[in-house]
Amino acid sequence: MADAPENTPLPSPFGSGLPSEGLTAHLTGKPGVQRVPSPKLTLFLRRGFLNPETCAAVIARIDSTRRPSTISDDNGDAAFRTSETCDLDPLDPVVAEVETKIMAFTGLNPVFGEPMQGQRYAVGQEFKGHTDYFEPSGVDYERYCGVAGNRTWTVMIYLNEPEAGGATRFKTIDKIVQPETGKLLAWNNRRPDGSLNPATIHQGMKVRSGVKYVITKWFREKPWGWA
């Protein structure tokens, strides 16, 4: 399959983001993309995916409507996730432009995507080790996965660089990714056989100085919002 320009959606995107050799090959072939060399998970990095002006515009939107972040299947640890979250408006031209750029770059089909979220981490705030998929045995599984199924791919973009701290650590492979303005991370929450991959456990480490902003786009097994 020929690689498509970053601003041109693939004519036949790779479905929901379920494990796909085609999708992995598509991302591997993108200019400037780095694949983390690990057999345990499929993880890609791309520096400078968004320009500083776009990042600043999205940060302003996060600051205007942020609220305390939440988790599913509450584990009783009030300090497990201490960030703030913003539900970004998909009709906002800036948000829509970022969404379009993500789809064109990854080849993921937008109908399987959740609405994009922004997160803000102040000094001392973190998100302890977690996976992005929902545990089938969890009490909230049907609530969060009954319509669109579980999560498949995650796309996360750093919008700025805090003065200290705020890295993302992938615990199983002991890989620490430092925040850089506009840097994109994309990973498959599944193993090659399609099963959920616990090696994707990752941690948003504490910010020690400054503030960290990121945006996250998750993809599902089925079209978002459809029965």
Image (spheres, rainbow, N blue to C red):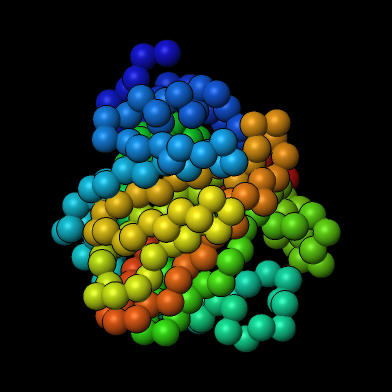
Q: Is residue 50 left or right of residue 221?
A: left
How many numbered discs, if any?
Answer: 0
Q: Position of residue 189 (x, y in %)?
A: 60, 46
Vertical placement of 146 versus 67: above or below?
Answer: above
Vertical placement of 135 versus 20: above or below?
Answer: below
Vertical placement of 92 versus 112: above or below?
Answer: below
Residue at the image point whose x is 51% and y is 81% from the top: 82
Extreme residue in the top direction: 1
Along the line of sight, the residue nearer the viewer: 222 or 192 = 192
Can see residue 211? yes
Rendered-image quadrant of the C terminus: top right
Q: Position of residue 51 (x, y in %)?
A: 19, 52
Q: Position of residue 205 (x, y in %)?
A: 45, 71
Q: Is residue 138 left or right of residue 56?
A: right
Residue at the image point whose x is 79% and y is 54% from the top: 136
Q: Quadrant of residue 210?
A: bottom left
Q: Is residue 85 left or right of residue 123?
A: right
Vertical placement of 218 versus 192: above or below?
Answer: below
Extreme residue in the left direction: 53
Can see residue 142? no
Residue at the image point whose x is 52% and y is 72% from the top: 127
